[in-house]
């Protein structure tokens, strides 16, 4: 008697998704606290991207929201307001969107284990990380200044001018993390045969 129990069906289970979300959230929080002394340098964004890349958009959103619901309130640098937290959660979801979108692109198909393919993957992931981080910073810098001036436009401009030094550090570090950590995880997972419902659909 053969069993229809497959790896993809296990990954489809609600309990498995909760466990995966919890693992990625714990990793993101642990690295956040480890890097607390370096402003705007976090591996969290890369982990949210990887979670969505492998396990889908909804799980990526779950990791993004879970991390900020903890880190936004339990943070040595200060507690975020509910309004600011909403901007942070939405901004973090950009990384999940990037991961899920890239999974469906030509870049994610037919990974080859050679150096050339890894280099291409690294460049593409780095560029995607830069774009997602730019969007995140633009939104959250705006959120940090919202209602402080006479118009939303001025809030956006002032927020992003004042936040520029932090944005540069955030974007530069994320380019490095996305170009190194993310493709390394993807290649390693591919080599050990990790297959998700997205891979077999």
Image (cartoon, grey):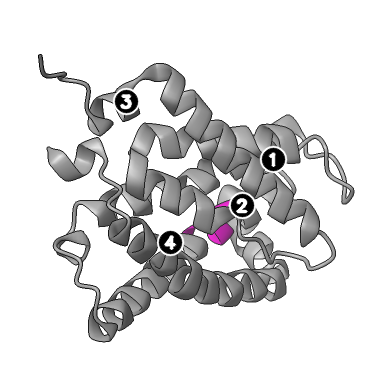
Task: Please tell me how crowded label 4 is: few (under 14), some (14-19), or many (20+) other residues with Cα within 10 Å.
Answer: few
| Marks 3 and 1, how far apart at CA | 37 Å
Numbered disc 4: secondary structure: helix
Q: Quadrant of the N terminus?
A: top left
In front: 47, or 85?
47
**Which residue lies under the disc numbered 4?**
185
Q: Which residue is mark 2?
A: 140
Q: Earlier in the sequence, mark 2 or mark 1?
A: 1
Does residue 141 appear to the left or right of 185 in the view shown? Answer: right
Considering every residue shown, the one lying at the far top of the view is 1
Q: Which residue is mark 1?
A: 84
Residue at 15% in and 20% down: 4
Q: Earlier in the sequence, mark 3 or mark 2?
A: 3
State the SS at label 3: helix
Residue 110 x, y percent position in the rendering = 14, 63
Q: CA distance from mark 1 to mark 4?
A: 31 Å
Query: Quadrant location of residue 75?
Result: top right
Which of label 4 and label 3 is nearer to you?
3
Residues under labels 2 and 1: Cα distance?
Answer: 8 Å
First along the sequence among labels 1 and 4: 1
Residue at 42%, 74% in the rendered image? 126
Q: Secondary structure at mark 2?
A: helix
Give the foreground label among 1 and 4: 4
- Of marks 4 and 3, which one's residue comes earlier in the chain? 3
Q: In the rendering, which numbered label is found on residue 10?
A: 3
| Magenta-highlighted residues | 135-139
Q: Residue at x 66, y 75 (%)?
A: 169
User: Which label sits in the foreground, 3 or 1?
Assistant: 3
């Amino acid at each position: 008697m053969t069993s229809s129990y497959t790896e993809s069906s296990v990954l489809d289970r609600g309990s498995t998704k909760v466990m995966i979300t919890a693992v990625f959230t714990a990793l993101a929080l642990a690295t956040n606290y480890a890097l607390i002394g370096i402003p705007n340098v976090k591996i969290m964004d890369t982990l949210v991207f990887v979670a969505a890349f492998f396990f889908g958009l909804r799980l990526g959103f779950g990791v993004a929201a879970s991390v900020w619901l903890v880190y936004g309130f339990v943070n040595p640098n200060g507690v975020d307001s509910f309004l600011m937290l909403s901007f942070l959660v939405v901004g973090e979801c950009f990384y999940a969107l990037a991961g899920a979108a890239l999974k469906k692109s030509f870049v994610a198909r037919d990974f080859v284990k050679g150096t050339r393919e890894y280099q291409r993957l690294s460049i593409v992931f780095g560029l995607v990380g830069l774009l997602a981080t730019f969007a995140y910073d633009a939104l959250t810098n705006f959120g940090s200044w919202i209602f402080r001036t006479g118009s939303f436009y001025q809030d956006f401009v002032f927020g992003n001018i004042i936040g520029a030094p932090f944005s540069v550090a955030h974007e530069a570090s994320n380019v490095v993390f996305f170009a190194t950590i993310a493709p390394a995880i993807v290649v390693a997972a591919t080599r050990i045969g990790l297959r998700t419902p997205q891979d077999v659909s």
